[in-house]
């Protein structure tokens, strides 16, 4: 397990970093994104703190934009998770947790939201992402393969004893144990973990192919 996860981290750390404030043009149309966070390390390198992909065709750039720049936590569970930690112990958390995506929920709950406060928290989330996070991307055209790899990568990192958060990691304030264990993910895990051939397959999707040996 540790060897496979270390190999995955070497691969990921060798990819070009995309900052929240730039790099949109370098994002492929389809793929898996991995997130690094300042201060978080494992296997002697930056620790992967989130894994994600998309279901719609040619939608990866839009999905990353929704996480990074669009101030709407109901369109990004990643943003909602970060906001939950920023608001730990704050009564406004109850409003933050409301999802106004559906018309019914808007009608039922929109009047309860302090719009000024919500805008301020969205700004805090954006500031945290732009100041702390970097993305790398693995191009994967096939939807089924994207989803399979995403689940396996998540399960591999979650099962690795070396991939644990630092004592000061913001995610430790999250109400979910799944996040507190070290990943900004709650859903999407699979039953299978990566094998070394799986990591080699992921590496083969990159051009030029990176060196992932120790």
Image (cartoon, rainbow, N blue to C red):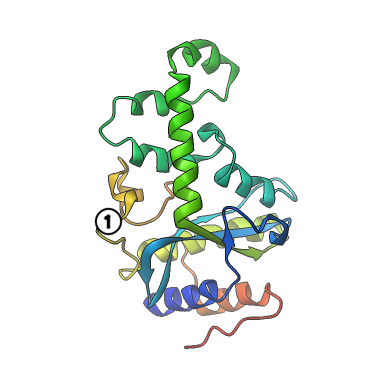
How many labels were placed on the picture? Answer: 1
Q: Which residue is rendered at x = 33% and y = 35% of the image? A: 87
Give the left or right position of residue 50, taking residue 211 as reference. Answer: left
Give how far across and how far down residue 46 sits, in percent: 43, 70
Vertical arrangement, residue 165 with respect to residue 67, above or below: below
- Residue 181, picture quadrant: bottom left
Q: Position of residue 188 (x, y in %)?
A: 49, 50
Quadrant showing the N terminus? bottom left
Residue 203 image position (x, y, % from top left): 62, 76
Task: Name the spot of residue 201 as percent of width and height, x first.
Answer: 62, 75
Q: Secondary structure at mark 1?
A: loop
Residue visible at 37% across and 69% down in the picture: 41
What residue appears at the point 66 percent right and 47 percent down from the top-left corner? 55
In the displayed structure image, the side of residue 89 where residue 61 appears, left or right? right
Is residue 55 at all visible to an observer of this figure? yes
- The quadrant in which residue 97 appears is top left
Work out whether residue 70 or residue 179 is closer to the camera in this orientation and state it: 70
Residue nearest the observer in this picture, 38 or 64: 38
Q: What is the crowding at mark 1: few (fewer than 14 residues within 10 Å), some, or many (at least 20)?
A: few
Query: To which residue does mark 1 refer?
Result: 168
Q: Is residue 195 positioned above or below 103 on the image?
A: below
Extreme-bottom residue of the structure: 214
Residue 78 in view in this figure: no
Viewer-nearest residue: 20 or 141: 20
Q: In the drawing, does residue 1 fall left or right of residue 33?
A: left
Residue at 48 percent of width and 79 percent of height:
7
Question: Which one is in front, 172 or 189?
Answer: 172
């Amino acid at each position: 397990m540790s060897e496979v996860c270390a190999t995955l981290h070497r691969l990921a750390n060798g990819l070009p970093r995309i900052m929240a404030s730039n790099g949109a043009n370098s994002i492929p149309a389809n793929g898996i994104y991995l997130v690094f966070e300042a201060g978080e390390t494992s296997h002697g390198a930056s620790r992967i703190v989130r894994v994600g992909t998309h279901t719609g065709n040619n939608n990866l750039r839009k999905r990353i934009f929704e996480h990074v720049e669009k101030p709407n936590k109901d369109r990004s569970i990643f943003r909602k998770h970060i906001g939950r930690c920023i608001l730990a112990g704050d009564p406004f958390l109850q409003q933050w947790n409301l999802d106004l995506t559906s018309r019914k929920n808007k009608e039922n709950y929109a009047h309860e939201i302090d719009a000024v406060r919500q805008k301020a928290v969205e700004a805090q989330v954006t500031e945290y992402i732009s100041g702390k996070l970097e993305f790398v991307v693995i191009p994967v055209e096939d939807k089924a393969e994207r989803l399979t790899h995403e689940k396996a990568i998540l399960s591999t990192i979650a099962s690795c004893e070396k991939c644990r958060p630092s004592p000061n990691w913001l995610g430790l304030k999250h109400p979910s144990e799944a996040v507190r264990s070290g990943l900004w993910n709650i859903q999407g895990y699979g039953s299978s973990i990566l094998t070394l051939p799986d990591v080699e397959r992921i590496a083969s999707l990159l051009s030029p192919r990176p060196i992932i040996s120790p």
